[in-house]
Image: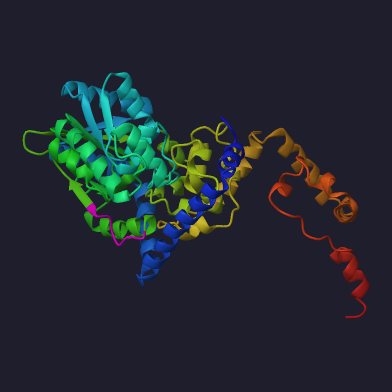
């Protein structure tokens, strides 16, 4: 795996794209702020949502069992998967049981996490992602770069060229309405011919045994209404105790994600349609382990709104693909180290620790604090790069010895004033690649204080 910094550097080389990506996400963040400020009780909603999630996570086993019992009572078949491999096998077995080979799928970060598309395609099944952004990146053979706006890294000109190659649209066409209509016509036959529909789950209600799917395009509804078989895949953390709690989260979700009052479609699925079949696959895949980590269990409160990504200065200027994980950005940087600490040890350092991610999180996850805690664990486990490890050892020695510290400060002030520029701004000075060092003072604060103490 390439380090985040290396991939981010590649993204930043295209300065125009970087600026456009940054501005696009900040525009969404600004819409979120306007939507939040329009609700006087916004902070109370956040606190209530956080408390509901705290309670649910503390009684997760009870609510999951209650959900399963109610869903079965509704005639739904419920499956349990310990990990991604078992999830994929279960979904495949359901499809085989129903002789389903053509599948339409709505956006689901869980199935992306499990690699379901690739697995089913290896079994000679056709899987069509029907969310517009997901279909774009599926045609482009790329992973999503954002959990809500998966193709946010692409410009309309690139989408136009892709559609021209794959869907035979007009050469050079970039009008979003024209391209969207082309995608709509392209997907219509897939909906009509589908043997099965797979969706993700935004919320699952223990009280009713139903699942809730929130979309803006209606593609999840189209799939589940037309196909005889519907499969809903959900992580164990999606559960809510009662239907009355749902309104808290639907008021927070869309406003945090895109600045909308609500998603266009908020669909409730409780039982299969007449002559149809409904299955729910409940997946762990490391979530129980994360639940057992006191410092990191709050990360399971996440409702996948993407607000932390839209506000993060690092994500906005490095792109989602630089994280090399299913969930990028700040929330991904505290989730993925729990899956593979060695592989993702660089991600908690892809942050300024400014705390903006925690400020906008609708369920009040302490993201920046968890990033800092992961840094401590990574250092303790010995996963820091050698250069960083040695530099931290040296910094510790200097900072713990007043004499060394004074000498280092004096040397640094002399160097920045008198050394030729090429000796300071060179490949060894990573910070100097994008910024100028401040002008060094002629004396330290301690020296100034000693001279001026008597005068005060």
**Measured from the top left, where is residue 325 in percent x and y?**
48, 36
Looking at the picture, tell me which residue is in the foreground, 154 or 311.
154
Helix, strand or loop: magenta stretch: loop
Looking at the picture, tell me which residue is in the foreground, 429 or 345.
429
Image point (74%, 55%), residue name: 436
**Total numbered labels placed on residues in the image:** 0
| Residue 436 vertical position relative to residue 102 in the rendered view, above or below | below
**Measured from the top left, where is residue 267 in percent x and y?**
20, 49
**Measured from the top left, where is residue 421 in percent x and y?**
83, 49
| Residue 323 vertical position relative to residue 360 in the rendered view, above or below | above
Quarter of the figure with residue 388: top right
Quadrant position of the N terminus in the picture: top right
Q: Residue furthest bottom?
A: 456
Left or right of 217 in this view: 448: right
Image point (47%, 58%), residue name: 26
| Residue 33 vertical position relative to residue 272 in the rendered view, above or below | below
Left or right of 302 in this view: 229: left
Q: Which residues are magenta?
A: 259-265
Asked if the stretch drawn in magenta spans residue 406, the answer is no
Left or right of 244 in this view: 394: right
Residue 83 appears in the rendering: no
Q: Residue furthest top?
A: 123
| Residue 405 vertical position relative to residue 333 in the rendered view, above or below | below
Quarter of the figure with residue 124: top left
Residue 188 appears in the rendering: yes
Q: How is the image coloured?
A: rainbow
**Measured from the top left, where is residue 333 in percent x and y?**
52, 43
Quadrant position of the C terminus in the picture: bottom right
Looking at the picture, tell me which residue is in the foreground, 23 or 301.
23
């Amino acid at each position: 795996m390439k380090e985040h910094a290396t991939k981010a550097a590649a993204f930043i080389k295209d300065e125009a794209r970087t600026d456009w990506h940054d501005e696009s996400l900040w525009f969404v963040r600004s819409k979120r702020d306007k939507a939040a400020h329009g609700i006087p009780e916004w902070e109370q909603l956040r606190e209530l949502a956080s408390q509901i999630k705290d309670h649910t996570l503390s009684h997760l086993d009870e609510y999951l069992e209650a959900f399963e019992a109610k869903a079965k009572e509704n005639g739904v078949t419920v499956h349990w998967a310990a990990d991604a491999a078992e999830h994929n096998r279960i979904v495949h077995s359901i499809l085989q049981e129903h002789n389903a080979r053509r599948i339409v799928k709505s956006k689901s970060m869980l199935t992306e996490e499990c690699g379901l598309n690739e697995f089913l395609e290896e079994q000679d099944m056709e899987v069509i992602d029907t969310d517009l952004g997901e279909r774009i990146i599926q045609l482009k053979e790329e992973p999503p770069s954002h959990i809500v706006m998966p193709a946010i890294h692409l410009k309309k000109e690139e989408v136009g060229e892709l559609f021209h190659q794959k869907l035979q649209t007009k050469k050079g066409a970039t009008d979003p309405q024209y391209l969207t209509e082309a995608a709509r016509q392209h997907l219509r036959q897939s909906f009509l011919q589908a043997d099965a529909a797979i969706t993700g789950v935004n919320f699952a209600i223990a009280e009713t045994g139903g699942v809730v799917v929130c979309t803006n395009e209606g593609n999840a509804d189209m799939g589940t209404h037309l196909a005889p078989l519907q499969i809903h895949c959900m992580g164990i953390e999606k559960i809510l105790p009662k239907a009355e709690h749902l309104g808290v989260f639907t008021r927070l979700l869309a406003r945090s994600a895109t600045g909308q009052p609500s998603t266009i479609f908020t669909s409730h699925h409780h039982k299969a349609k007449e002559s149809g079949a409904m299955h729910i696959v409940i997946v762990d895949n490391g979530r129980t382990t994360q639940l057992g980590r006191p410092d990191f269990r709050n990360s399971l409160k996440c409702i996948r709104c993407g607000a932390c990504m839209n506000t993060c200065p690092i994500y906005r200027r490095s792109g989602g693909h630089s994280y090399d994980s299913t969930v990028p950005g700040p929330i991904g940087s505290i989730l993925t180290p729990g899956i593979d600490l060695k592989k993702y040890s660089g991600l908690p350092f892809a942050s300024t620790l400014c705390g903006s991610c925690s400020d906008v999180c609708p369920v009040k996850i302490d993201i920046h604090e968890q990033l800092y805690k992961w840094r401590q664990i990574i250092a303790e486990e010995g996963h820091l790069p050698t250069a960083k490890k040695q530099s931290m050892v040296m910094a510790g020695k200097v900072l713990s010895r007043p004499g060394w510290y004074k000498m280092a400060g004096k040397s640094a002030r002399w160097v920045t004033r008198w050394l030729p520029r090429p000796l300071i701004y060179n490949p060894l000075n990573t910070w100097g690649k994008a910024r100028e060092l401040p002008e060094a003072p002629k004396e330290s604060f301690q020296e100034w204080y000693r001279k001026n103490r008597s005068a005060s």
